[in-house]
Image (cartoon, grey):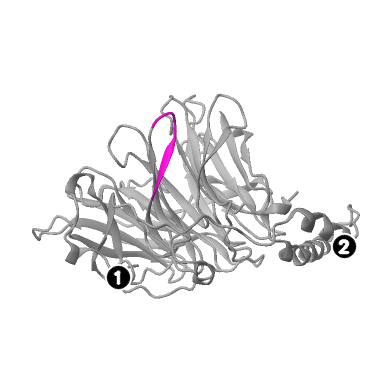
Amino acid sequence: MPDPTHLPAGYWPQQVLDKIALYHQSRRNDLVIPDYQAIVDYFVKDAPPGYQFPPPVESLDTTFQAVPLQWGGEKDLMAVSSTLPLVDGRTPEDAISLAVTDLWTGVVKRLEFHRSESSETSKVDVTSTLLGRGGNPSRIHEADLDADGIMDYVVSDLGSMAPQDERQGSVWWLQGQSDGGFRRHALRLGLTRVADALPFDYDGDGDLDLIIADFGLYFSGGVEIMRQTGIQDGIPQFETEVLDPRDGCIEILIADFNDDGLDDLITLVTQNAESIDLYLNRGDGQLERKNLHTGNTPTLGSSGIEVVDLDKDGDLDVVYTCGDTFDDNMAKPFHHIGWLENEGTFPLTPHELFRMPGVYTATVGDIDQDGDLDIAACSLLSQHQVDAYPPGSFPSVVWLEQTEDMEFAPHVLETDRCHAATCRLIDIDRDGDLDLYVPPLTVEMTPQTEYVWWMNRTIDGPVPSDESADQTAAQ
């Protein structure tokens, strides 16, 4: 049941109408629809007249500093949906490599970050190489899918930017070639917005299967297993079965959650479920589902998860974000970064760490090099939402400093430029501390003229002012 306080009163009449219409479209007839006005009155009675946000941020933290990237190659990144650190053996020792997917331009690229040969430590050169293309690629994973000793990539493709039930989603295999190139093959076509396609030896037979997050919309989608049955003419063949029929899955992770030596699955299912679930691997293709957390309202806007031992007590926890606004294009004051503490029972114990409207991704690492784990995060909001409130109302890039007793102190690096769906803590300049890469994604799909990275100043100190990124023009 939605929480009446999670939408302003004026929105509820249309919301109720939309949901009644959706029930009729489903062709179900097992429920009795209550009186329309009675439903509206129920929600409006406790709903606020509008949203109230905290006062605008007055000063910005300087632990990180935005610095322009010296870009080599075409500037065709406009809507980056995912980043993947590469361990394919092709990256020079003095560089860091990421694979990225772009929802708007359709490119799948390899980015190689090098510290510039100039004397300035802040200079970072980027070599951009095209790996392949899709329609609207959402996520990428490394895997030697055909076991030929050459690393490949598996790319999930939404097939459309807007949520829909039409079957335009795909799973692509970028097959690594001996000359260093890639050949694209379709492993699955006709799905409804594939948000993730994760290589995983589901049945323990030594070859790689795929776990598919088919987002769908209202009447299609689900989590599916593509079990590899062999190789035919050099192409892996699969049989498919449904793991979870619910639509709305946006992310799947692998981790040995119960420390039994077997990889388990963690899924994030949004839409009406707002559910983070664990699939314990019992061996021989047997998975046991446990709920780790369920949001308190379907308007929560779950947007991402990361599995990590945040409190360093020897077991795995989950850091999650709730900030999606694609349903209604409305920033919400209850959007937040959270921590699910593993205390040995299910569900896990939730802790709200920081409220951040539109927060889309959180990434974990020891930012200040004090031995514990901190969190960095970015947000995604339309400029229309941002402009409706006073300047400084919306933190767009933040880091949360773990202090003591699992308390987190928020540090806002930037406000009102809520133009990112993903971020990554990675030592871009190879100086020993974690920098922050926040690639661009604007809801308006605005072309980008300059890309930046956030340099961690823990070791290097500040960048000279004439080299700092213009906060207004950057990204």
**Near-viewer residue (364 or 85):** 364
Q: How many marks?
A: 2
In this picture, is 403 found above or below 399? above
Q: Residue at x 61, y 56 (%)?
A: 215
Point out the tag, 2 or 1, that comes first from the N-terminus.
Answer: 2
In this picture, is 164 found above or below 282? below
- Local crowd at mark 1 within 10 Å, few (<14), some, or many (≥20)? some
Tag on residue 450?
A: 1
Please tell me whether mark 2 sits on a helix, a strand or a loop: helix
**Near-viewer residue (94 or 47):** 47
Q: Position of residue 459 (x, y in %)?
A: 19, 44
Tag on residue 37?
A: 2
Q: Is residue 180 visible?
A: no
Indicate whether residue 333 is drawn in magenta.
no
Q: Is residue 352 visible?
A: yes
Q: Is residue 429 left or right of residue 33?
A: left
Q: CA distance from mark 2 to mark 1?
A: 52 Å
Which label lies toward us, 2 or 1? 2
Q: Residue at x 76, y 67 (%)?
A: 14
Mark 1 residue type: Glu
Magenta region: which residues?
404-411
> Which quadrant of the structure image shows residue 372?
top left
In this picture, is 45 found above or below 308? below
Q: Is residue 299 left or right of residue 26?
A: left
Q: Position of residue 27 (x, y in %)?
A: 84, 61
Q: Is residue 414 left or right of residue 212?
A: left
Indicate whether residue 410 is drawn in magenta.
yes
Please tell me whether mark 1 sits on a helix, a strand or a loop: loop
